[in-house]
């Protein structure tokens, strides 16, 4: 069994993680500063928070782009979301690209440490002082358009119901990303230990599992008369780049109502799944005989 404490973790495991984290922190700081500067300069945008309420677009984007910590009770497989389009300067765009590179570098280090034969990832993170890193918040890139100006950006909600299999081992790893001193987590870990290792479990997530789809339209090509379109998907606001703050594409957001009221819940197809969650913190159910 892996060492679940941070005692004795060698420096050659801690130092690469801390170095990647420092670089990521520098990138976060640059993004925050540049977004404040853009807003003050008059760059435009529109946004709704995760409840569908209007929000300051650059401020909301800054929060989501640089959010990297797991809060108590967070599902380690899920991250917060919001709708929006912001117009940014070329300097800010460059800081987004820097942020995405540091995100990828940090994820690469975390992925490499996951496979260590002696020390668990959580013990290495604890030794590095980084226990609250949220893997999936860091993994998601900032997405947008850095080249040609779009004519319009229309946002819509995509939602699906996840029904997938999880192994006992995978569920154990996910639960151990929570604070294991909490009684409700201990209860779930104890219940999981009594399940045969070979038994498949069902991961079911029916609410808030949504992405934002951006339908982007560009001006007509003067040579062909055709209009080019593209799609982007994310859980965070999208950006478009402009050299001046006096331009913005036409932006259409979903109606400002609570998102759960907009989304039709689909009927779960797999009737063999016990409707009562077995491991509620990670949305895992058992299959019925």
Image (cartoon, rainbow, N blue to C red):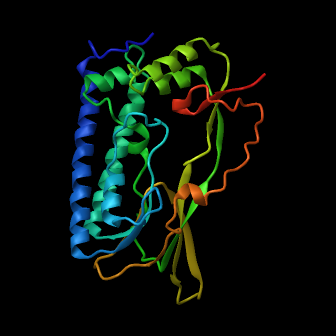
* Rendered-image quadrant of the C terminus: top right
For this rendering, which residue is in front, 23 or 127? Answer: 127
Q: Nearer the viewer, residue 179 or 246?
A: 179
**As drawn, 32 above or below 226:** above
Q: Look at the picture and state if 265 lies above or below 121.
A: below
182 vs 219, nearest the viewer: 182
Res. 148 in view: yes
In x, y percent, where is residue 188? 52, 20
Q: Is residue 245 above or below residue 32?
A: below
* Percent x, y of residue 96: 32, 58
In the rendered image, is residue 145 in sight?
Answer: no
Observer-nearest residue: 280 or 2? Answer: 280
**On the rendered structure, is 245 left or right of 136?**
left
Which quadrant of the rendered structure holds the N terminus?
top left
Q: Is residue 13 above or below residue 251?
A: above
Q: Along the horizontal axis of the image, is 122 left or right of 37?
A: right
Residue ID at (43%, 34%): 73
Counting the numbered discs, the total is: 0
Residue visible at 54% across and 58% down?
259
Residue 178 picture quarter = top left
Residue 30 placed where, x, y %? 22, 55
- Residue 254 in the image: state x and y as whole percent: 53, 68
């Amino acid at each position: 069994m892996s060492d679940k404490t941070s005692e004795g973790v060698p420096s050659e495991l801690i130092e690469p993680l801390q170095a990647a984290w420092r670089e990521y922190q520098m990138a976060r700081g640059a993004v925050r500063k540049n977004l404040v500067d853009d807003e003050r300069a008059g760059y435009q945008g529109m946004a709704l928070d995760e409840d569908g309420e209007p929000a300051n677009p650059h401020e909301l984007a800054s929060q989501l782009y640089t959010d990297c910590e797991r809060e108590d009770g967070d599902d380690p497989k899920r991250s917060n979301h919001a709708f929006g389009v912001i117009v940014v300067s070329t300097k800010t765009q460059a800081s987004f690209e820097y942020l995405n590179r540091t995100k990828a570098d940090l994820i690469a280090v975390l992925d490499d440490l996951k496979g260590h034969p002696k020390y668990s990832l959580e013990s290495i993170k604890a030794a590095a002082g980084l226990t609250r890193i949220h893997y999936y918040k860091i993994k998601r890139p900032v997405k947008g358009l850095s080249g040609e100006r779009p004519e319009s950006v229309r946002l819509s909600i995509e939602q699906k119901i996840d029904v997938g299999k999880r192994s006992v081992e995978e569920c154990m790893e996910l639960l151990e990303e929570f604070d294991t001193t909490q009684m409700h987590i201990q209860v779930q870990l104890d219940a999981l230990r009594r399940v045969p290792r070979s038994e498949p479990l069902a991961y079911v997530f029916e609410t808030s599992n949504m992405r934002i789809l951006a339908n982007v339209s560009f001006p007509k090509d003067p040579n062909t008369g055709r209009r080019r379109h593209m799609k982007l998907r994310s859980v965070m606001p999208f950006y478009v780049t402009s050299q001046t703050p006096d331009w913005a594409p036409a932006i259409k957001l979903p109606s400002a109502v609570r998102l759960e009221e907009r989304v039709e819940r689909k009927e779960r197809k797999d009737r063999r799944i016990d409707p009562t969650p077995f491991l509620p913190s990670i949305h895992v159910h058992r299959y019925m005989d």
